Amino acid sequence: MIDVIIATNNKDKLCEISGLLKPYGINCLSLGDIGFADEIEEDGDTFFDNAYKKASFISKKYNLPALGDDSGLVVDSLPNELGVRSKRFSPSAIDKENNDLLLIKLEHEINRQAHFISQIVLYFPGGRFFAYQGRIDGEIARDFRGNNGFGYDPLFIINENGKRMAELTRDEKNMISHRGRALAKLIEDIDNEIVTFQ
Ligand code: IMP
């Protein structure tokens, strides 16, 4: 098994990522596993900036490959309000309050189109890095449904199947989600030996 640090404090994200990478011989270490307890400030203007910052910082500090994921919800009728700032949309940054605020802001809105983006950066000691992006399109519902997932999942209606993201099991979500799609591109490059761990 190859050790890769997943540069996130989000346990849900970690579970989704390690579930996908384990079958490829990658042992995902959490920041807790390596004793890193600080927050890495996500102050970039783009998903790439933040994912690169997290992955490169942790890889350089611990001299191991590190994977950073920066993700978020983009809502067409609220440009510039979510995106890279999705986590801190409401003042408390708590998922439930983020979702409640989103419902309030869209109360009289007809255009409810949205998409999730996941930007992944895998950074190796020495400076080699690989970047991938995944996307899923959908719309924002007017009520909550489903108990799985995290963040905006109970409000996100997936275009392809009409289900809420929170109604999917972890494996179902990984098959279709923005993060699953970004990781599938990484896995393809591992299979094709474009990404190597030597
Ligand atoms: P960050 O990537 O840690 O900055 O977090 C991004 C924020 O976007 C999360 O806190 C969630 O609010 C939201 N988000 C990212 N990915 C997902 C997802 O898969 N489902 C629901 N919400 C998500």
Image (tube, grey):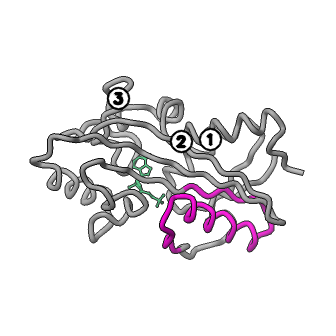
Secondary structure at numbered mark 2: strand
Placement of 197 over or under 143, stated as above or below: below
**Residue lying at 24% horizontally and 50% vertically, measured from the top left:** 77
- Looking at the image, do the residues carrying marks 1 and 3 touch, with CB atoms under 8 Å apart? no
Give the label, 1 or 3, closer to the camera: 3
The residue furthest left is: 108
Secondary structure at numbered mark 1: helix
The residue furthest right is: 198
Report the magenta residues as a range.
41-69
* Mark 1, residue position: 183
- Tell me where residue 185 sits by quadrant: top right
Amino acid type indicated by mark 2: Gly
Question: Quick check: 39 left or right of 185?
Answer: left
Q: Position of residue 150 (x, y in %)?
A: 39, 48
Placement of 32 over or under 69, stated as above or below: below
- Tell me where residue 24 sits by quadrant: top right
* Mark 2, residue position: 134
Mark 2 or 3, nearer chain start: 2
Where is the N terminus found, in terms of image quarters? Answer: top right
Amino acid type indicated by mark 1: Leu
* Mark 3, residue position: 159
Placement of 48 over or under 173, stated as above or below: below
Amino acid type indicated by mark 3: Asn
Give the label, 2 or 1, closer to the camera: 2
Label 2 residue near ligand 1, CB within 8 Å: no
**Residue lying at 20% horizontally and 58% vertically, measured from the top left:** 101
Q: Is the residue marked by circle 1 packed among few (<14), some (14-19), or many (20+) residues within 10 Å?
A: many
Q: Is the residue marked by circle 3 packed among few (<14), some (14-19), or many (20+) residues within 10 Å?
A: some
Q: Nearer the viewer, residue 2 or 57?
A: 57
Q: Position of residue 169 (x, y in %)?
A: 45, 32
- Looking at the image, do the residues carrying marks 2 and 1 touch, with CB atoms under 8 Å apart? yes
